[in-house]
């Protein structure tokens, strides 16, 4: 059955309530590569509950994992991919908190019959007491089997163009063989990332890493290079998810700094340099 775009845009879901503690923030940091050098004092602040403890901003993705919008959308989920992610951070994430999450579909871009449908969902995390926004999560889903509905909310945005010069910095981080098993404890329990039978049925030789884990590794690189590990300076980050990562892969993130904009791309050198995150853009405020 074809998707009804007006129904999708009018979709209303009850606010989702969530709560977290320092422990969830530490788990996310470990699951996205922080602390690989356990005596690096800058990264230790994300995983050790000592003085100066800080939260990686992209932890906001997992503090309120809520996929009801996908199940209610009518999309063929078996043929859908997480194509792009963007986050806006309105203020630092507190180590302990309670919040409410509102969800709505903001955009639909029809690529045509047999070419798929792009659906953008906005989730806003607000402090449960004050109602002030903490973070906005923008998820772009590519529904490969649902194109041809004859409706778009407007022209599809163009991807962020990366500079043509050599990168200003390169950061490498090794994922561990059990990285996906660790990251799934942050909330995304899709068996594709744990069960070999499910992975093989989907066309993969073995379970793959969560795209958002790869994204977290890239955010870690941006925090170190562009923010000097001051999380409050990272205001926005986003990238296209272009290829899967296998646990154990080394991730190489190239970073270009132009004023308040940090452009980035992540590749896997050990697999012919395949690009796994592309057209990355982060906005950083100066000190």
Image (tube, rainbow, N blue to C red):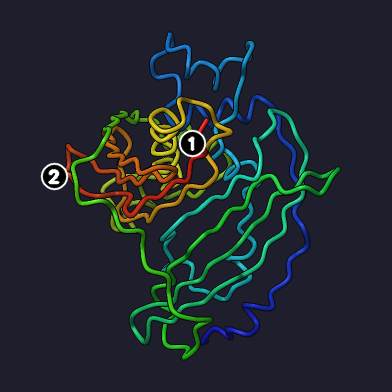
Structural crowding at the residue carrying mark 1, measured as other residues with C-alpha within 10 Å and reported as few (<14), some (14–19) or many (≥20): many
Mark 2: secondary structure? loop
Nearer to us in this view, 187 or 194: 187
Residue picked out by circle 1: 183
Residue 12 screen position, x and y as percent:
73, 71
Relative to 7, residue 196 above or below: above
Residue 66 screen position, x and y as percent:
64, 54
Q: In this view, does 254 lie to the left or right of 46?
A: left
Q: Is residue 169 left or right of residue 261?
A: left
The image quarter in which residue 34 lies? top left
Structural crowding at the residue carrying mark 2, measured as other residues with C-alpha within 10 Å and reported as few (<14), some (14–19) or many (≥20): few
Disc ID at residue 29: none
Relative to 29, residue 124 above or below: below
Of circles 2 and 1, the one toward us is: 2
- Kindly identify the residue that appears in the image at 18 percent across and 38 percent down: 269
Single out the residue that lies furthest toward the bottom. Answer: 150
Relative to 247, residue 101 above or below: below
The image quarter in which residue 268 lies? top left
- Kindly identify the residue that appears in the image at 42 percent across and 70 percent down: 157
Tell me how far mark 2 sits from mark 1, CA to CA: 25 Å
Single out the residue that lies furthest toward the top. Answer: 39
The image quarter in which residue 220 lies? top left
- Kindly identify the residue that appears in the image at 77 percent across and 50 percent down: 100
- Kindly identify the residue that appears in the image at 64 percent across and 57 percent down: 123
Mark 1: secondary structure? helix
Q: Which of marks 2 and 1 is nearer the N terminus?
A: 1
Residue 176 screen position, x and y as percent:
35, 28
Residue 266 screen position, x and y as percent:
29, 43
Residue picked out by circle 2: 272
């Amino acid at each position: 059955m074809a998707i009804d775009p007006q129904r999708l845009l009018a979709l209303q879901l009850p606010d989702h309530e969530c709560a977290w503690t320092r422990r969830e923030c530490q788990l996310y940091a470990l699951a996205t590569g922080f602390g690989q050098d356990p005596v690096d004092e800058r990264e230790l602040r994300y995983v050790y509950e000592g003085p100066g403890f800080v939260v990686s901003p992209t932890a906001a993705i997992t503090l309120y994992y809520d996929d009801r919008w996908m199940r209610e959308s009518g999309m063929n989920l078996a043929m859908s991919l997480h194509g792009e992610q963007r986050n806006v951070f309105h203020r630092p994430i507190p180590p302990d908190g309670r919040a409410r999450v509102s969800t709505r579909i903001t955009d639909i871009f029809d690529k045509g019959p047999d070419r798929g449908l792009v659906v953008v969902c906005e989730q806003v995390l607000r402090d449960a007491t004050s109602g002030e926004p903490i973070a906005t999560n923008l998820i772009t889903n590519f529904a490969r089997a649902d194109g041809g509905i004859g409706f778009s909310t407007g022209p599809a945005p163009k991807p962020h163009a990366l500079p043509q010069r050599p990168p200003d910095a390169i950061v490498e981080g090794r994922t561990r063989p059990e990285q996906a098993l660790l990251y799934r404890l942050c909330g995304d329990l899709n068996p594709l990332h744990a069960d070999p039978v499910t992975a093989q049925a989907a066309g993969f030789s073995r379970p793959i890493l969560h795209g958002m884990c790869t994204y977290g590794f890239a955010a870690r690189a941006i925090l170190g290079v562009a923010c000097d590990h001051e999380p409050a300076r990272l205001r926005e980050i986003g990238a296209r998810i272009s290829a899967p990562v296998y646990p154990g892969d080394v991730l190489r993130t190239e970073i270009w700094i132009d004023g308040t904009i940090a452009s980035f791309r992540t590749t896997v050198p050990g697999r012919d340099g395949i690009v796994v995150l592309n057209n990355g853009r982060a906005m950083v405020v100066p000190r």
